[in-house]
Image (tube, rainbow, N blue to C red):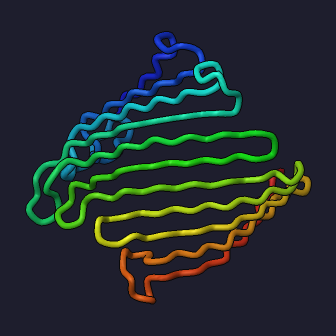
Amino acid sequence: GTVEVTPSALTPDGITMHVAFSGDADSGNTSDKGTGGGSGILGSGWDLTLEASGDALGYDGLTVYAGISQVEAFQNAGTQSGDVSEKVFGAKYAAGAFTVGYQKTNEDTGATGTTDYDNIAYAVTFNVNDDLSIGYGHTESDNGTTTAEADSLQVAYTMGGASWRIAEVNVDNATYSTASSADQDATIISLGLAF
C-alpha cells in the first residue's frame, strides 16, 4: 500500500506539500482478508510535491508547483536497467477570463534502450462568458533523437445540464518516428449531461 502525508501544520499559508511512500510500487491490489498480487520489477518508491500560491507568492492568481518521484527498479536484462524517476515543475496564472500555464518534466523510465524523455507543455484558455470557453494547448516530448509534438484547440459550451466539447488535435511524430504514418489528426466531440 501507499502512505501519503500532507503536513499542513508545517507549511506556511499558501504552500501545500504532499509526501508519499510505497513499499512496493507495482504489487497487485488486495481484497478484504486476501493476499497481495505478484510483484513485478518495481520496488519501493516515494513522491514529494510542493505547490505555492496566493499568500506565499504575493500575486493573486499565480500558482507554482514542483515534484519529484523515485521508484526502485530491480535489474532485468530484458526490460529494466535502472530506477524510474520523474521531475516536474510548472506555473499557472489566472487573470480575469484568461488562464495560462507552463510545465516542464523529465522522465527516466529506467528501461533498456531509450529511457530519458524531456517534455514541455503550455496552454491558454479564455472564458468568453459563463457558458463558452476556448483553449489552445501544445506539448513536446523529446527522447534524445526525435521530438513528438501535439497541438490541440478546444471549445466548450454549457447549456443548463448539458456540456458540449469539441477538440481538434494534431500530433506530429506520435511514435517518435519521422515517418508520415506517425502523424495523426483527430476531431473529438463529446456531450456531458448532469442530472
Is 41 or 166 nearer to us in this picture?
166
Residue 42 place in picture, x, y as percent: 22, 47
Q: Position of residue 166 (x, y in %)?
A: 74, 69
User: Which residue is nearer to you in this view: 26 or 32?
Assistant: 26
Identify the residue at image location x=55%, y=27%. 52
Provide residue 6's location: percent of width, then percent of height. Answer: 47, 22
Q: Is residue 59 left or right of residue 134?
A: left
Residue visible at 24% across and 65% down in the picture: 114
- In this view of the protein, which residue sits in the foreground, 95 or 20? 95
Q: Quadrant of residue 59?
A: top right
Q: Is residue 152 above or below residue 29?
A: below
Q: Residue at x 8, y 62 (%)?
A: 77
- Check the picture and name the quadrant holding the N terminus: top left
**Residue at 76%, 39% in the rendered image:** 95
Q: Is residue 112 positioned above or below 38 on the image?
A: below
Q: Is residue 110 above or below residue 3?
A: below
